[in-house]
Amino acid sequence: MKLAWKELCYSKKKYILIELVIVLLMFMSLFLSGLVEGLGRAVISAVDDMDVDYFLLSDSAESLITVSELDMGVYEQAAEQTDAELALLDIQRMYLTKADDAEKLNVTYFAVERGSFLAPDVAEGESFEESGAENPIILDDDFKAEGIALGDTVCDSSTGLEFTVIGFAKDQMYGHTSVGFITTDAYQEIRRLLNPSYEASCHAIAVRGTEIENIRLDGTEIIAKADIIKNIPSYTAEHMTITMIVWVLVVVTAVIIGVFYYILTIQKQKQFGVMKAIGVEMKQLAGMAASQVCMIAACGAVLAAALTYGMAAALPQTMPFYLKNEKVGILLAVFILVSVAASLISVRSISKVDPMKAIGGAQE
């Protein structure tokens, strides 16, 4: 390790240039990783953040909450068959307008009951239970960028039903659309205004708890939360595609380190020959090579992570960018391990150096 550090310090200009390339490539990998999570959160965060274990849907819904439709009597029957907590959930894509403003804003309503465990954590303002508003709504905080503030009145564009903004929740998205949490009563009122013959129903029943074995209702199925998330339109395809690009970049970056160091090894064959001639063992030379690559990779990983987190703090709130600390850690650890593995090419080259030929200048 000491010998490797001395070598890096002696040829610092050369290694600084290599380090810059590594930092930029690794930063690109981490940036794409943040985009993967950000885009994924923009599709699933409202469901992912729910303290739910399962969902009860109609068996023809193909694990899509918005396609499911359950009679209200199903809720009562399910409650009799399990001790787990149950809650009604409806999801509907609509438009909101601000008071005295005709501009339509995309919103996905999440209709939940007052006091339900599905109600969001409020980052600013009041919860449904705390508010006395007739038709309260809790909006994702992205709506603040649209000029909406606490106490404002917003309208459902299709029916004209007015809501009072009582709170803002952080990072509540579904299908790339910001979520507005409303009460089940308000949602059913919207449905009645759109269709006077509407009969009360719900899209899904959320289940908190694992006691689901006794729930046996015709025309329904119990689906785990993870499976619901996987089946949200566009989530799996987007996530897998960009994730693959991220890991390809990690491998490419590690290979570049290996190529750089292989070239440097060829240029230093005479030095390695002299070291072998004076009795330095191959395991020491191999340790020096691996240590150098490990230090370069580790330093590059730390700098790239610092640059990425710094940039994340400066990005606008509406940017779909989200860093998971555990994923960043895994990405950097894999990067360092793959880089060290790539350095084995150089170790093999060092092992083939003939001291006599190297000292005599007869390089391959």
Image (cartoon, rainbow, N blue to C red):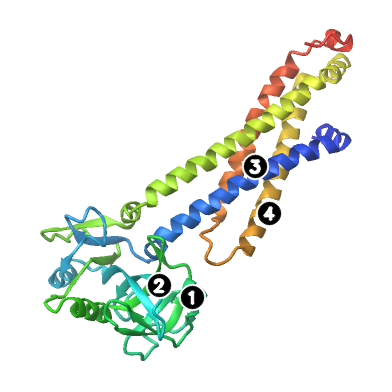
Viewer-nearest of labels 2 and 4?
Answer: 2
Mark 1 packing: few (<14 Cα in 10 Å), some, or many (20+)?
few
Q: Nearer the viewer, mark 4 or mark 1?
A: 1
Q: Is residue 270 left or right of residue 117?
A: right
Residue 38 location in percent, x, y? 50, 57
Which label is found at residue 25? 3
Q: Quadrant of the N terminus?
A: top right
Spatial separation of the CA atoms under disc 3 and disc 4: 12 Å
Name the residue that disc number 2 marks: 105
First of labels 2, 3 by sequence position: 3
The answer, for residue 327, to whether it is visible in the render is: no
Q: Measure the alpha-carbon separation of dots 2 and 4.
A: 34 Å
Q: Quadrant of residue 177?
A: bottom left
Residue at 48 percent of width and 40 percent of height: 244
Q: Are marks 1 and 2 in contact (CB under 8 Å)?
A: yes
Q: Mark 1 sits on what residue?
A: 146
Residue 80 seen in the current view: yes
State the quadrant of the C terminus. top right
Q: Amino acid at mark 2?
A: Leu
Tell me the tag on residue 307.
Answer: 4
Look at 78% across and 26% down and name the residue there.
264
Q: Is residue 60 left or right of residue 98?
A: left
- The alpha-carbon separation of the residues under discs 4 and 1 comes to 30 Å
